Image: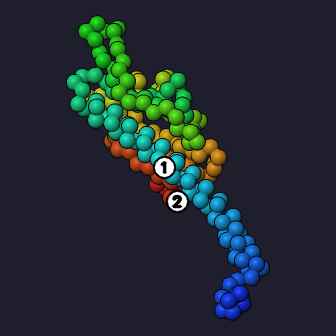
Amino acid sequence: MHNPIQQLDGSTANGYTLLEMMAVVAIVAMMASMGAPLLQQQLARREVETVARRFIQHAQFARQAALLINGDRVQIMPIERQWSRGWKVIQVKIQPQPTALTEQVLLSQRDITPVEIDERGSGFAGPNGQQKQISFDAFGAAKSQSGGFVANRMVFRHQHARGIERHAILSSGGRWRLCDPSQDSRACR
């Protein structure tokens, strides 16, 4: 409730008391403190979603590059054997000599913090725990290092909000899908 205030020239002005102003500030502060965790959770979801979508885009780029490059393999593989350090897309050029291979990095993604990739899964490792990677041949088929078709998943989690994760799933047909296990656990199987 505002109270009229008598000014020096005799006119009156309407204003609010200090107690009313403090009550408004307290209500605004309380609302902000309730909304901050929700905002942090929304930001964490967005970070995980962004990194997972970027991984899928880079894998699709690798597949397209394999279709366009004549005879060479294109691979997406972890940096320093750990997906959480990032990944790189490389072109493996096959030389005339059977033992001579050269690699050319086409694309890389290094810093994905605060997102981590769950390393407990196979992470696209070969059947004997070989090098983790996805190789695409000239037909765009995703294959393991031993030559078998690949169907697998990557699990992206936020480092500080453990309940927030996304699964990037590669089907045997080469299509990727992204799912949120907290929204639809059946789609993430």
Q: Earlier in the sequence, mark 1 or mark 2?
A: 1
Query: Residue 105: which quarter of the image?
Result: top left
Residue type, mark 2 in image: Gln
* Between 2 and 37, the one nearer to me in the picture: 2
Q: CA distance from mark 1 to mark 2?
A: 14 Å
The residue at 48%/23% (across/down) is 131
| Depth check, front residue: 102 or 122 | 102
Residue 161 point in image, percent of width and height: 63, 50
What's the mark number on residue 183?
A: 2
Q: What x and y, as percent, mark residue 109?
A: 45, 33
The residue under the point 33% across, 41% down is 173
Callout 1 touching callout 2 (CB < 8 Å): no
Element type at marker 1?
A: helix
Q: In x, y percent, where is residue 101?
A: 34, 13
Residue drawn 55% across the image and 49% down it: 165
Q: Is residue 112 left or right of residue 146?
A: right
Q: Residues within 10 Å of mark 1 (few under 14, many from 20)?
A: many
Query: In the rendered picture of this protein, how many numbered marks are placed on residues?
Result: 2
Dividing the picture into quadrants, the one containing residue 57 is top left
Q: Using the image, determine if residue 170 lies above or below residue 108.
A: below
In this rendered view, identify the residue nearer to me: 63 or 110: 110
Residue, x 60% and y 56% (percent of image)? Answer: 41
Residue 49: mark in rendering = 1
Q: Identity of the amino acid at label 1?
A: Glu
**Residue situated furthest front in the rendering:** 9
